[in-house]
Image (cartoon, rainbow, N blue to C red):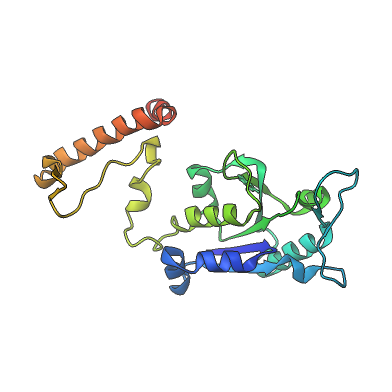
Amino acid sequence: MNFHVCTLFPEMIEQGCQTSILGRASKNGLIQIETTNIRDFSTNKHMKVDDYPYGGGAGMVMQAEPVYAACEYAKQKLGEKTRVIYLTPQGNVFHQKMAEDFAKEESLIFLCGHYEGIDERVLEEVVTDYVSIGDYVLTGGELPAMVMIDAIARLVPGVLNNDVSADIESFHDNLLEYPQYTRPPVWHDKEVPEVLLSGHHARIEEWRYQCSLERTAKWRPDLLEKHKSK
Ligand code: 6GU
């Protein structure tokens, strides 16, 4: 799967995506993460990409043309029909089902804004999806793009070591994950729950399911309601 990020800070994406599981997946050719620097498409001799907002107000606005040219360049590489995701606190709030939907695509383009935003006219022409990662304000779209790339890439077959773990984890069926334990069997006087040492797979599965229900009731009652109504 191809991820292409249009940004003024490509090094942020490149640094953040080359380690750990995403780094390994890139080296193994399971995913490709590329960046386009919007500044390379500046039409200004000083390589400026922003200007004052019409109507006044604080801050600067990213100009339409460099953003348009960067997105068109990415589309030329990945296909004209590639979805273009604009990261903005005004977008739909990202969740696991959205990650699963995006993971079906061959390629995705992420558009990261900075300053007070991007000229609305270019957004109307290129953006297919407006996405926020939650109700707080960040300085730019790069961290949100990386959050989305991580959530989507881990759903690509082969990216995780363990083929089953992608769908038995938290949020599958709207339940939080059960607690995990590893050696030693006693640590700081705390014992591993006895059932996990029993080798009795049906009892272990039932215990884990009950733990998931309890945790979800305690920490995310909103999710438990969704679980029950399925
Ligand atoms: Cl996608 N962008 C910015 N700048 N802030 C955010 C966000 C996105 N999602 C939550 N906060």
Is residue 153 shown to the viewer in this render?
Answer: yes
Q: Is residue 207 left or right of residue 70?
A: left
Outermost residue to the left? 198
Residue 197, position in %: x, y? Answer: 10, 47
Q: Please name the residue shown 14% across and 54% down the image.
A: 184
Residue 159, position in %: x, y? Answer: 41, 62
Closer to the camera in the image, 150 or 72: 150
Q: Please name the residue shown 31% across and 59% down the image.
A: 162
Total labels: the figure holds 0
Q: Is residue 174 left or right of residue 132?
A: left
Does residue 19 sit above or below 82 in this rendering? below
Outermost residue to the right? 55
Is residue 104 shown to the viewer in this render?
Answer: no
Q: Please name the residue shown 25% across and 47% down the image.
A: 180
Residue 161, position in %: x, y? Answer: 33, 62
Does residue 189 sit above or below 19 in this rendering? above
Residue 206, position in %: x, y? Answer: 20, 36
Quarter where residue 156 is shown:
bottom left
Does residue 63 sit above or below 221 in this rendering? below
Q: Please name the residue shown 32% across and 33% down the image.
A: 215
Quarter containing the C terminus: top left
Quarter where residue 37 is shown:
bottom right
